[in-house]
Structures are given as C-alpha cells and as structure tokens.
Image: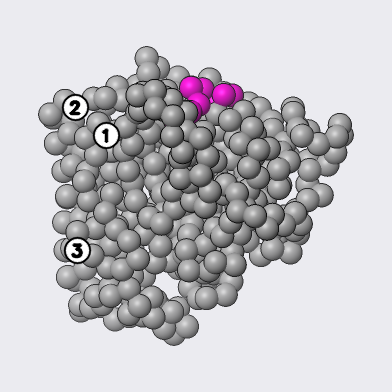
Amino acid sequence: MCDTCGIGPEFTGSGISIFGKNSDREPDETQLVVSVPSKNDGAKEELRCTYISIPQVEATFAMVLSKPFWLWGAEMGVNEKGVVIGNEALFTKVKQEKSPGLIGMDLLRLALERGGDARQAAQIIIDLLEKYGQAGACGYRDKKFSYMNSFIIMDRKVIIKLETAGRDYVMKDAGTHAAISNGITIARDWDSSSLAPNTDFSKFSDPLITYFSGSAFRKGGNETAINQAKGKIDAGEVFAMLRAHHGDAPGKSFNRDVCMHAAGPLIRKSQTTGSMVVELHPEDKFRIFVTGGSAPCLTAFKPFLPAAPFPDTVIGAGHYSDDSYWWRHEAYHINAFLRYESVRDLARQYIREIEGKYVEKFPPHAWRETDASLVAKSHSAFKESEGQEKIILGRMKTMKKQAPRPSALFWKHIAGRCGVPLV
C-alpha cells in the first residue's frame, strides 16, 4: 500500500510544485535513499533491471531515488531536470505474464533516468510497457505478491496520472493537483490510451482486493487535506498528510492510515518504510526531504542534497546493521511502536524541533549544490535526528509496552528475525 500526491503552483500559492509519497512495503524491507550520477559516455551496453536486461541509452540524467534494497528499480524519485515520479500498486483482474518483464519500480527508474520532462517520462513508460510488459514478483519475502501500477509523473509545469494493466494504459492530465493510492482513478475520462475509444478502464479493477487495501479512504483523506489547504501548501503541509492516522493509535484502522504501520501477517502487513517530499522551485532549484526510515509519524524529514548525500542512507540489506541509517532508525521505530502512546508526544516534540531548525530555513538550491554550509546543515539534520531518537530509545527502558498482544508478537518476531535489539 502507498499514497502519492502531486500539487501544482495554483494550490501551493507560492509558485512552486510539490510531490509527496509514502512507500509502504514489507516491514523489514530496507529502503535506501541513493543519489545516482548522470552518465554520458556514449557506451552501448545491456542494462540489468530487476528481472530482465534491456538496451541502455547513451546518456542518462542524475537522480535521487528511494528504493527497496533488493530491487534495481525505485518507489519514488526525482531527476536533475525536475521530473518527479511515484508509483502505486494496482490490483486488477489482468494477471501478469508468465515470462519476466519489467516491474513498476523498474519503469519508474527508467523514466527518471531518461525523461527530460513529465510528458517525455510518461511516454517512456508507455513505450517500455508495450515492448517488455510488466511481470515479476514485487514482494521482498512474499514472492507471490505482484501487481500492476499507476504513477504520478510531474515536473514544474504539469501533473500526469498514468494507470496500467498488463501492457495497456490510460493517461490523463491531472491539472492543478492529484492524489492516488492503490485503486484505479481513471474510468472513461482519459486523454490517451492503448484501449479502444470510450473503454472504461475501471472495469479492470479487482474490487475485493482494492477494497481491503483501504485505498479509497486514504486517497479521499489526502484530497480533502489538499483542498482545505489550497493556496498555502508547503512541505510542512505535505509532511502532515504523510503522517496522518485514522485514529490516534496506529495499526488498528483497517489500512486507512496514510502513515501505515504493520500489525500482523494478514490484513495489515505493509509498513511505511520510506517517505519523500520534493519541492520544485523556479530557476531549476529544488528542496528534497526524506525520512530515511520507517513511520514518518515518529521521525523528522531531513533535507537531502543530491551532490552531497548523507552516506549511511545507501547502506542496508535484509538484516540489522549498525552501519545502516535505515536499520538504526528501525530499532527506534520498532521499540516505539510497542509503546506508541507513551512515545508519541516525545516524538512530535523532537520532530518540531528538528524540522523547525533544518527544514523551514533550508533554501532552494541547484541540483549540484555543494556549498559547505548547506552540506553541513543537511548532514547535521540526519545526525541530530538520530541523536534525539537515541535519547527517546533510552527513555523507553522505563516505559510499559502498550501494543495489543497480536501486534506485539508480530513485531517481536520481526525484530528477532532481523536481529533488531529490543529494550
């Protein structure tokens, strides 16, 4: 389960465009934040994606990606041209082909590395979809888990929704803003499609799985938040959207939390494992914010510089490691979930302090910005955020565990399997 939004200048009221996404994956699936340099060496080579190889192009754009550690592709990202993309799982009656193809995360990364604007990126996905199809396991441990994909693709001028089933697609200009979740949003009102005229794309939806995903509720909540804040939306407003819970205690709302917390192996088995917010400013400037870890309700968004990334965000695999920012945060997150009611206010206070210090005054910057003061601020945000989480983690030793027994047993199992220290 995931949630993605794109907001144009008419709704921000400041001349900028904003993208936001929570990536919901399996609870111990490390999500890395990586900065990928551009390439322009003219070499013709085969590019290995997650399951198949395809011809590589001669030149690619630099990118910042948030990606599951084991996939070639990515859940969300932005390139140096100001193209931003997030994908969503779509549950459809169209089943994947037997032969491996590209998966949605591959399509997203390929579009970012090759697309100079949103329309070009969308067409790249369409062309690759037609040629290679989408097929392959999308789950980390659950290799039976697969899905079709929808995308928000945006730049400083346009926001596009692209929804797919098999090798077919529908595409629509979203106008001033868009929010998507794990359900089809385009019926017959598409602008272009591989289907016959007037075809209702929504007929491809698997209604049962889509209902249980809770996507309509989460999408509706984000749309309401965008409309209520029209004319004054900034990164902080999008942070709040991505932290939203249906109730104060997470993990109980039948997949209705935008900030998703796994609570068991059946209905609520997904977890927000990474979050990204991107501001696209005039004059080719950016502000990129990431959590670098799970559960945005418990951690601060930090500014991320493409030319000077915080090094520990690129480290991590399937087991706890002290070298990995994601896993160090995960130790805090799992222990906090077990005591959520006691930790919640402490986390909120630390988040306000960190974001007030490092987000509100962090200036828009060029893609290749390496100003020493900005690099120091970006890296300090990660270090100070982690320092505050360690302090809270220490205080948890005297806090009573409050998670319901089934959820507590589930998370203790996850921690034991991955070597996460519990307090």
Question: Magenta segment range?
Answer: 112-120
As for residue 116 lying within the magenta part, the answer is yes
The answer to whether residue 164 is above or below residue 172 is below
* Left or right: 329 in relation to 276: left
**Distance from label 2 to label 1 (Cα)?**
8 Å
User: Residue 322 got which mark?
Assistant: 3
- In which image quadrant can residue 35 be found? top left
**Count of all numbered marks drawn on residues in the image:** 3
**Distance from label 2 to label 3 (Cα)?**
27 Å
User: Residue 370 got which mark?
Assistant: 2
Residue sitting at x 28%, y 75%: 419
Residue 256: x and y in percent read 57, 60
Mark 1 or mark 3: whose residue is earlier in sequence: 1
Question: In terms of secondary structure, where does tag 2 sit?
Answer: loop
- In which image quadrant can residue 158 be found? top right
**Residue 164: in sight, yes or no?**
yes
Quadrant containing the N terminus in the rendered view: bottom right
Query: Do the residues bearing badges 2 and 3 touch, measured as CB atoms within 8 Å?
Result: no
> Residue lying farthest top?
283
- Sort mark 1 into few (<14), some (14-19) or many (20+) by Cα contacts within 10 Å: many
Question: In terms of secondary structure, where does tag 3 sit?
Answer: loop
- The amino acid on which the numbered mark 3 sits, given as a three-letter code, is Asp
- Mark 1 = which residue? 305
Q: Which is nearer the eye, 379 or 251?
A: 379
Q: Which is nearer the eye, 68 or 211?
A: 68
Question: In terms of secondary structure, where does tag 1 sit?
Answer: loop
Query: Do the residues bearing badges 2 and 1 touch, measured as CB atoms within 8 Å?
Result: yes
Quadrant containing the C terminus in the rendered view: bottom left
**Distance from label 1 to label 3 (Cα)?**
23 Å
> Depth-wise, is mark 1 or mark 3 nearer the camera?
3
